[in-house]
Amino acid sequence: MLDLQAYKERVYIEDIHNHVGEEVVIAGWLYNKRSSGKIHFLLVRDGTNIIQCVVVKNECPDEVFEEAPGIPLESSVLVKGVVKEDKRSPLGYELLLTDLRVVHRAEEYPIGKKEHGIDFLLDHRHLWLRSRRPFAILRIRHEVVKAIRDFFNERGFVLVDTPIFTPNAVEGTTTLFETEYFGQKAYLTQSGQLYAEAAAMAFGKVYCFGPTFRAEKSKTRRHLTEFWMVEPEVAYFDLDDDMKLAEEFVSYIVQRVLENRRMELEILERDTAPLEKVTPPFPKITYDEAVKILHENGVDFQWGDDFGGADETIISNQFDKPVIVHRYPAEVKAFYMKRDPQNEKLALAMDMLAPEGYGEIIGGSQREDDYDTLLKRLEEHNLPREPFEWYLDLRRYGSVPHAGFGLGLERTVAWICGVQHVRETIPFPRTIYRLTP
Ligand code: 4AD
Ligand code: MG
C-alpha cells in the first residue's frame, strides 16, 4: 500500500499533460466511481480538476483491486499510476492505476445520490463546494478578482483599503447594519467610496476592494447582505471619463475570463457568444431614453422612479452589450452626486446594466465637489453633519472634479457564468435568511 508520505511527490491534475507515460502520484478525494466486474473506474479530484483512474487486475496489487470498488465517495485518497492520453475523456488523460492508499474513509456522503433542492445544498455549502458547478463558478470568480486587480495595477491605481466599521451612511439609511462600538454607534460599511474619495485627493487614482454590507430586506436573485465591491475613484475626472473607464474595465474582465477559464465556462454550459461581443465602446443612453424604451414596451413607468429588476431587463434586452444609463433623476440617487449643470433635476450618475437580464452591475457618478452644495445635500437627505465633517473637509482643502464607480463582484460573476442567482457566486453566501454555514 502507498505510504502517506507519497503525497510529497504528487503532481496536480492540471499539470498532468507534462507527465504522459510517467508514473505519478495524485493526492485528492474520490469524486465518483463505477465498476464493470473486471475493471473499476475511480474519478479522483484534487481541486484543480478530475481524472479517471482505471483499475485493472494484474496492473496493481490484488488487495488494491479488491478495495477499490468499496471506497466511499469523498474519501481522501492517494493514487499512483501511469499517465495515458485518452481522447475520449473530458480531461484528455487518464491514469492506469498501480497503487492506492485511502487516507481517510469518509462516512456516507450526503450530496450526490439524488437531485437536491437549493436549500439542502446551501445548508451543506461547506461540502457542496467540492462539486463540479461550484468548482467552475468559484474558479471564474477567482479569475475575475485577479483581472480586477491587474486592470487597476497596470494603470497605476493605488489600492487603498477602506474601513469596515464606519460612522457614515453612504447609500441611504434603510439598509444599515448597526453595531455597538465601545458605547458608540457604528455601521458595517455599505461602500468604501467616501474614504476612496479622500484617498484620491492624496494619490490621484485609487481603488478599494472588499466586502460591503447591506441589510437588504428584499429577497431577490441579485441581492446579498454581504457582497464584494471594487470601487475606483479618480481626481480630475468627470462623468464621461468615468463611463469610459467602466466600459474598458468590464471588457477587460470578460476577455480575461474567456482567455483563461474556457474549461469552467464549458462545465457551466455557458454560451460564450454573447461574452465575445463585450468590447468597448458600450451603448450609452440617458435615463430619459431608457424611460422611452420602457414606454415603447408597454411598461407603465413614471418619470422620476428608479428602475426595478424587470425594467432593467427590458432596457438591457435592447442591446447585445452592457448598456450604460446616465443622468438619473437626482431624487432617486445618493446625496454625494453632482447635479447636471444643464438640468439641476438630474444627477451626473451612471449605472451599467449587464446583458441577458442580469441587471445593474455598476453604479457610479461624478461627485459634488462644492462645499456649500454638499452641505445642503446632507441636510436634504436628513444626514447628520457631524460624522461627515471629515468628508466635507475634502471640499475645503483643494477640491477638484472627481468621479468613480462601484462594481458588484457577485453580480458580475453571475452574469459571466450565466447563473441565475448571486448566492452561487460567493463561497459562503449571506442573505436575509442565511447566516450558516
Ligand atoms: O449602486 P451602488 O449602491 O453604488 C455604490 O455603492 C457607490 N458608492 C459606488 C461608487 O460609486 N463607488 O452599488 C454598486 C454595485 C451595484 O451596481 C451592484 O452591482 C452591487 O454594487 N450591489 C450589490 N450586489 C449584491 N447584493 C447587493 N445587495 C448589492 N447592492 C449593490
Ligand atoms: Mg446602484
Image: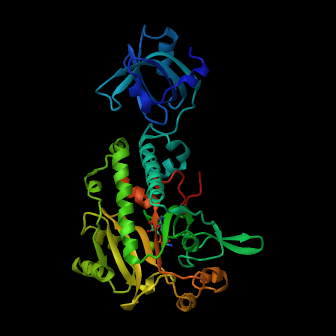
Q: Residue furthest right?
A: 183
**Residue at left offset 35%, top offset 55%:** 254
* Nearer to us in this view, 277 or 187: 277
Q: Is residue 311 above or below residue 23?
A: below
Residue 415 horizontal/vertical position (percent): 37, 58
Residue 135 at x, y percent in the picture: 45, 43
Q: Quadrant of the N terminus?
A: top right
Percent coordinates x, y for residue 73 in the rendering: 50, 30
- Disc tally is 0
Q: Nearer the viewer, residue 151 or 194?
A: 151
Residue 124 visible in this rendered orientation of the protein = no
**Does residue 231 appear to the left or right of 418 in the view shown?**
right
Camera-nearest residue between 100 and 240: 240
Find residue 179 and report its image quarter.
bottom right
* Whether residue 316 can be seen here: yes
What's the colour scheme?
Answer: rainbow
